């Protein structure tokens, strides 16, 4: 077989495959027969297409927030390295109680357990509270430069986080604002 005939044969197969797909485009059952889906992917077909699209729209935001919260936890660990028992300070008594309650609740269920690190049990708003209450440590270590600036940025990001965490849809403008605030956060370091 010559190279030209191989290419012709390949192109015929591609065109043929595209034509076959076009015929079954509206028939999910036939598409399922052509494509093998994982059990998780197959279970998504039970949901309205609108929700699947919105979930896909929020995926990037979720990744950004995951990275931000874990980066903030690392920054807190760095700033408070010389205070391993910072959560025992009287100013954090409410946070300590909340962390203990969350740990107790999860240990009782014996599933979906987080790391034992107290920071893993704090929400973004609570992490912001630690930063603000221990501000001098962050400033002294060059982690953040402006208390008011980081307070505003984390407050705005947390508003978007709450919407996303409760599986609501963010408008394009709100997603753009979240991305901008995440950029501002990175410039604060």
Image (tube, rainbow, N blue to C red):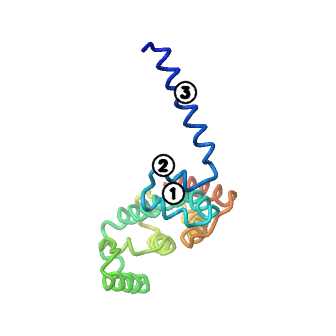
Q: Tell me the residue that label 1 is attached to.
A: 64
Distance between the alpha carbons at the discs numbered 2 and 1: 31 Å
Residues at marks 3 and 2 touching, judged by CB atoms closer than 8 Å: no
Spot occupied by residue 117 in the image (x, y as percentages of width and height) = 32, 72
Q: Earlier in the sequence, mark 3 or mark 1?
A: 3
Picture layout, residue 61 above or below residue 130: above
Spot occupied by residue 90 in the image (x, y as percentages of width and height) = 39, 85
Q: Tell me the residue that label 2 is attached to.
A: 35
> Image quarter for residue 184?
bottom right
Q: Nearer the viewer, residue 93 or 133?
A: 93
Q: Tell me the residue that label 3 is attached to.
A: 12
> Image quarter for residue 138?
bottom left
Q: Is residue 82 left or right of residue 166?
A: left
Q: Nearer the viewer, residue 99 or 169?
A: 169
Which type of secondary structure does the marked residue at label 1 adopt?
A: helix
**Mark whose residue sits in front, 3 or 2:** 3
Spot occupied by residue 136 in the image (x, y as percentages of width and height) = 45, 67
Q: Earlier in the sequence, mark 2 or mark 1?
A: 2
Using the image, tell me which numbered label, if any, was put on residue 131.
Answer: none
Picture layout, residue 38 above or below residue 84: above
> Image quarter for residue 101?
bottom left
Q: What crowding class fits label 1: few (fewer than 14 Cα within 10 Å), some (14-19), or many (20 or more)?
A: some
């Amino acid at each position: 077989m010559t190279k030209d005939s191989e290419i012709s044969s390949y192109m015929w197969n591609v065109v043929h495959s595209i034509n076959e797909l076009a015929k079954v485009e509206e028939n999910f059952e036939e598409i399922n027969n052509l494509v093998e889906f994982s059990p998780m992917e197959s279970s998504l077909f039970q949901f309205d297409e609108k929700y699947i699209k919105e979930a896909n729209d929020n995926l990037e935001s979720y990744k950004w927030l995951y990275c931000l919260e874990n980066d903030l936890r690392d920054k807190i660990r760095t700033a408070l390295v010389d205070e391993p028992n910072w959560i025992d300070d009287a100013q954090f008594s409410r946070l300590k109680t909340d962390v203990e309650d969350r740990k107790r609740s999860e240990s009782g269920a014996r599933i979906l357990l987080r790391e034992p690190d107290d920071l893993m049990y704090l929400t973004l708003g609570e992490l912001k509270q630690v930063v603000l209450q221990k501000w001098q440590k962050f400033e002294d270590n060059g982690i953040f430069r402006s208390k008011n600036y980081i307070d505003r940025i984390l407050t705005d990001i947390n508003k978007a986080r709450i919407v996303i965490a409760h599986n609501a849809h963010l408008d394009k403008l709100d997603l753009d604002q979240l991305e901008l605030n995440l950029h501002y956060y990175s410039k604060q370091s």
